[in-house]
């Protein structure tokens, strides 16, 4: 069984910090410009500046948390259904 909350927290931290780092690097280097434009179309208020980097951090955390929390719940549900105690015998 997976701990869905911990899985969600770890994914949220990784995606949020990753998005923050990409934004900061893009501010100083100009690289990942096309990626930033895609992210701006997904996350309202996200931009290539310090405020936008923190907005991206929050959006990334929420996205990562929700996605892997739901993944953990579904995984646990499927694992529980497939366990031998749930199989009916004639």
Image (cartoon, rainbow, N blue to C red):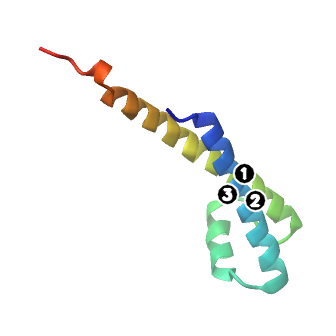
Direction right: furthest residue:
50
Residue matched to label 1: 13
Q: Position of residue 1 (x, y in %)?
A: 49, 32
Bin the neighbour count of mark 1 within 10 Å (Cα to Cα): few under 14, some 14-19, many 20 and up: some
- Drawn side of residue 55 relative to residue 42, left or right: right
Residue 17 has which mark?
2
Can residue 45 be seen here? The reply is no
Going 61% across and 71% down the picture, which residue do you hit?
A: 38
Question: How many angstroms separate mark 3 from mark 2 (CA)?
Answer: 6 Å
Residue matched to label 3: 15
Question: How many angstroms separate mark 3 from mark 1 (CA)?
Answer: 6 Å
Q: Is residue 80 above or below residue 12?
A: above
Near-viewer residue (78 or 29): 78
Going 82% across and 58% down the picture, which residue do you hit?
A: 54
| Residue contact between numbered discs 3 and 2, judged by CB atoms under 8 Å | yes
Secondary structure of the residue carrying tag 2 is helix
| Residue contact between numbered discs 1 and 2, judged by CB atoms under 8 Å | yes
Can residue 55 be seen here? The reply is yes
Question: How many angstroms separate mark 1 from mark 2 (CA)?
Answer: 6 Å
- Drawn side of residue 53 relative to residue 15, left or right: right
Q: Is residue 47 above or below residue 57?
A: below
Assign the C terminus to one quadrant of the image. Answer: top left
| Residue contact between numbered discs 3 and 1, judged by CB atoms under 8 Å | yes
Q: Position of residue 3 (x, y in %)?
A: 58, 34
Secondary structure of the residue carrying tag 3 is helix
Q: Position of residue 25 (x, y in %)?
A: 79, 77
Going 24% across and 21% down the picture, which residue do you hit?
A: 87
């Amino acid at each position: 069984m997976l701990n869905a909350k911990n899985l969600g927290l770890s994914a949220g931290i990784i995606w949020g910090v990753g998005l923050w780092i990409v934004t900061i690097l893009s501010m100083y280097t100009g690289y990942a410009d096309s990626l930033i434009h895609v992210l701006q179309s997904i996350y309202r208020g996200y931009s290539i500046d310090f405020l936008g980097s923190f907005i991206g951090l929050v959006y990334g955390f929420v996205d990562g948390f929700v996605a892997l929390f739901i993944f953990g719940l579904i995984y646990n549900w499927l694992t529980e259904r497939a366990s031998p105690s749930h199989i009916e015998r004639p």
